[in-house]
Amino acid sequence: MMGGALLASLVALLPVGTFGWFNAGPNGLVSGLLGAVTVIAFLGGGTPIQLAAMGQGSHQAVGLVLVGYVSRVAMLGLVLGALGPGRSHWNPDVNSAVVGIVLTSLAWIAGLVITHSRTRIPVFDTEYRAPARDGD
């Protein structure tokens, strides 16, 4: 299921990069792609952690999920710190970064929805049986 979300997010890199380039040149391109890659790393890193936690006991699962969230939020803090004024050797474009974050998040969600909508779940999806006819 993560494959559909990842594919949709990677496809979103093209409009993100294009917007960044036309908005602020090379700095906009790098800023937009940095925002997009951050979203992919955040959401993509969380999915395997959630799947691993499903097989653990309740206390271990909660601990694993919390450690996963803390580490991913710390990663977001590092990226936002890098985008802060006067903190880097390049001039990041915040507008391009925001567009990259929003477009990639929407693409990830769209990929998940499309992938989940095509998933067959045996408990809920039963074989179709035609209604009985009156003469049969």
Image: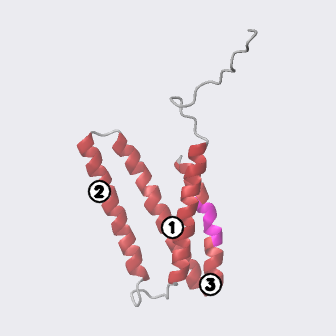
Marks 2 and 1, the one that precedes in the sequence: 1
Find disc 3 in the rendering and name its residue. Answer: 23
> Circle 1: is it few (<14), some (14-19), or many (20+) Cα within 10 Å?
some
| Of pointers 1 and 3, the one earlier in the residue sequence | 3
Label 2 CA crowd tier, 10 Å (few <14, some 14–19, many 20+): few
Q: Is residue 15 left or right of residue 47?
A: right
Tags 2 and 1 in contact by the CB under 8 Å rule? no
Q: Residue, x 62% and y 74% (percent of image)?
A: 17
Q: Residue at x 69, y 15 (%)?
A: 132
- The type of residue carrying mark 1 is Val
Q: Position of residue 88 (x, y in %)?
A: 42, 86
Rounded to the nearest angstrom, the CA distance separating label 2 from label 1 is: 21 Å
Look at the image and tell me in which quarter the C terminus lies: top right
Q: Which amino acid is tagged 2?
A: Val
Between disc 1 and disc 3, the foreground one is: 3
Side (left or right) of 45 relative to 118? left
Q: Quadrant of residue 80?
A: bottom left
Asked if labels 2 and 3 touch by Cβ distance under 8 angstroms, the answer is: no
Q: Quadrant of residue 29?
A: bottom right
* Distance Cα–Cα, label 3 vs label 2: 37 Å
- Element type at mark 2: helix
Q: Which residues are magenta?
A: 9-15
Residue 61 at x, y percent in the picture: 29, 45
Q: Which mark is residue 58?
A: none
Give the residue at mark 1: 37
Residue under numbered circle 2: 67
Badge 1 marks a residue whose secondary structure is helix
Packing grade of label 3 (10 A; few <14, some 14-19, many >=20) is some
